[in-house]
Image: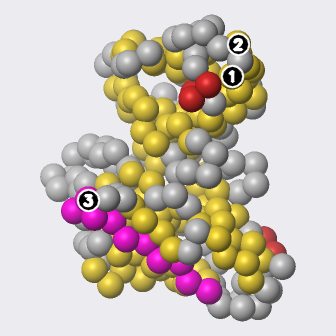
Amino acid sequence: DTAVSQTPKYLVTQMGNDKSIKCEQNLGHDTMYWYKQDSKKFLKIMFSYNNKELIINETVPNRFSPKSPDKAHLNLHINSLELGDSAVYFCASSSQDLLGRGVFYEQYFGPGTRLTVT
Amino acid sequence: GESVGLHLPTLSVQEGDNSIINCAYSNSASDYFIWYKQESGKGPQFIIDIRSNMDKRQGQRVTVLLNKTVKHLSLQIAATQPGDSAVYFCAVPLDSSYKLIFGSGTRLLVRP
């Protein structure tokens, strides 16, 4: 009954490779996110999708490409991996601010994917 | 822009004592604040929130205090337990309801 799940939990790969992380939520939420947490625990948003539409795209290298095949899934593909990409990547989801009132809905986080680039 | 910071990176408390974790924010227009708890190997988990029209909000063993004058909020945990050991983040939505800015985190260590 996991609300937000990610696969894989651990990913070790070499520089230059291409890898994907998958995320699924069964909460019925319309909005999903990708966050990056570095070794100092600093957590920063990367992307957000609302109803399969990209709504937040932070200053992230274009080697990172999110893809949302449907509302319940948001995958993250990373090309030409670099050492600096090593981090924990969290997927999250939330309800939608339908009326655009700036109402914040709680974001539910997945367990994270620890990516190590060697 | 918004920045959120914490005064102490690590806080060590005796089991049973009260814990206070502090957070400062920079945007005086911020009107909503959230505390998250992240246990080792897990994702952040919502603890409690507070809106700017409030100074204090209480949950189960947790209290959040907001001082808008000095742009500071704190999370108080009563009778700290070993299960409270985690990294605690304050967070503020920026610009829209979707973009969440996290503080740098405080690690809470509970001594038995």
Q: Residues within 10 Å of mark 1 (few under 14, many from 20)?
A: many
Position of residue B15 in the picture relative to residue B75 (left or right): right
Provide residue B107's location: percent of width, then percent of height.
Answer: 69, 33
Secondary structure of the magenta portion, mostly?
strand
Is A14 in the magenta? Answer: no
Instruction: Decide: is A75 above or below A86.
Output: below
- The secondary structure type at the circle numbered 2 is strand
Q: Which residues are magenta?
A: A19-28
The reply to whether callout 2 and callout 1 are in contact (CB within 8 Å) is yes
Position of residue A84 in the picture relative to residue A53 (left or right): right
Same-subunit check for callouts 3 and 2: no
Query: In the rendered image, which residue does mark 1 sit on?
Result: B110
Position of residue B3 in the picture relative to residue B53 (left or right): right
Is A23 in the magenta? Answer: yes
Label ID, residue A27? 3
Q: Residues within 10 Å of mark 2 (few under 14, many from 20)?
A: some
Instruction: Decide: is A32 above or below B103.
Output: below
- The secondary structure type at the circle numbered 1 is strand
Label 2 marks a residue whose chain is B
Query: In the rendered image, which residue does mark 2 sit on?
Result: B14
Residue A53 seen in this snapshot:
no
Provide residue B92's location: percent of width, then percent of height.
Answer: 47, 39
Q: Residues within 10 Å of mark 3 (few under 14, many from 20)?
A: some
- The secondary structure type at the circle numbered 3 is loop
The reply to whether callout 3 and callout 2 are in contact (CB within 8 Å) is no
Amino acid type of the residue that numbered disc 1 sits on in the rendered structure: Val
Provide residue A101's location: percent of width, then percent of height.
Answer: 22, 46
